Image (cartoon, rainbow, N blue to C red):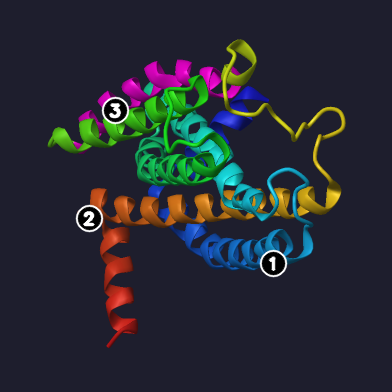
Amino acid sequence: MMNKLTLWFHKFGSPPIFHRVAGLLLPWLYATAVLGGLVAMYGGLFVAPADYQQSDAYRIIFIHVPCAWMSLFAYLFMAINAFIALVWRIKISEILAMASAPIGAIFTAVTLATGAIWGKPMWGTWWTWDARLTSELVLLFLFLGVIGLYNAIEDRRQAARAAAFLALVGIVNVPIVHFSVSWWNTLHQGSTVRLLGPSRIDSSMLWPLLLMALATHLWFFASVLARARASTLELEAGKDWARDVVLKAGARHE
């Protein structure tokens, strides 16, 4: 079983195969993400009722919460690929890890921005050094650190390995972000959506939230694949298959 899994990793990790498969998936991922996001936004803004305490101000959760979930998922995705790249030296995992860092940073920045917008009317301040907010800010700095380290080293393979090591070191912050509202007394509200057991949120609010989370995940994968395809062509520029792809793309635009 392990040998089959390893062979699958190496087969899919072949740059020409990855480039081709990713190209087939991209349109479907983008289209499904946009459609799901539009339906979720309509449900969150027009179908879900106003909150009994926060009125319509709570509706920012349909952006804030999925982006917060995505910030953690993006870091886990980056760290897992960094581990695979360091252990098995799979080039595509290096590329995927580095491609996911900027996208994860954007989701984290949106989380912090929407949290500040939501926090002002609820807490009376744009920012407080709350455990959840502070650990989420650290997560943003970790993403930026990986991006900065990767771009600071000229050799792309060495840069990816150094940045991958930093990504693995920073993984300790992920459980801190997730469990911060349980471990410390914070202003940030606790979890209302549970995978195991009933969620503490009305179903009319829950389905747009979960659908938006699905849409952001699909958008994340599409964006990572698009960036990874471009990086693969750049790294493999001297190979025959990469030149053929560029020539065919140029012929289609003439």
Q: Image point 33% across, 20% down: which residue? A: 165
Foreground residue, 245 or 26? 26
Question: Where is the N terminus found, in terms of image quarters?
Answer: top right
Q: Image point 45% across, 23% down: which residue? A: 135
- Provide the secondary structure element on which disc 2 rests: loop
Residue 34 place in picture, x, y as percent: 59, 66
Residue 6 visible? The answer is yes
Identify whether 211 is placed above or below 95.
Answer: below
Foreground residue, 3 or 247? 247
Query: Residue 23, labelled with which disc?
Result: none
Which amino acid type is marked by label 2? Ala
Read off the magenta span: 156-179
Residue furthest bottom in the image = 254
Query: Who comes first in sequence, dot 3 or dot 2?
Result: 3
Q: Inspect the magenta stretch and tell me whether residue 55 lies in it.
A: no
Q: Which residue is mark 1?
A: 42
Query: Who comes first in sequence, dot 1 or dot 2?
Result: 1
Which amino acid type is marked by label 3? Ala
| Left or right for 88, reference 121 | left
Q: Nearer the viewer, mark 3 or mark 2?
A: 3
Query: Residue 237, labelled with which disc?
Result: 2
Q: CA distance from mark 3 to mark 1?
A: 39 Å
Q: Which residue is mark 3?
A: 163
Identify whether 148 is placed above or below 235.
Answer: above
- The answer to which quarter of the image holds residue 128 is top left
Q: CA distance from mark 3 to mark 2?
A: 22 Å
Number of numbered tags placed on the structure image: 3
Question: Where is the C terminus found, in terms of image quarters?
Answer: bottom left
The secondary structure making up most of the magenta span is helix
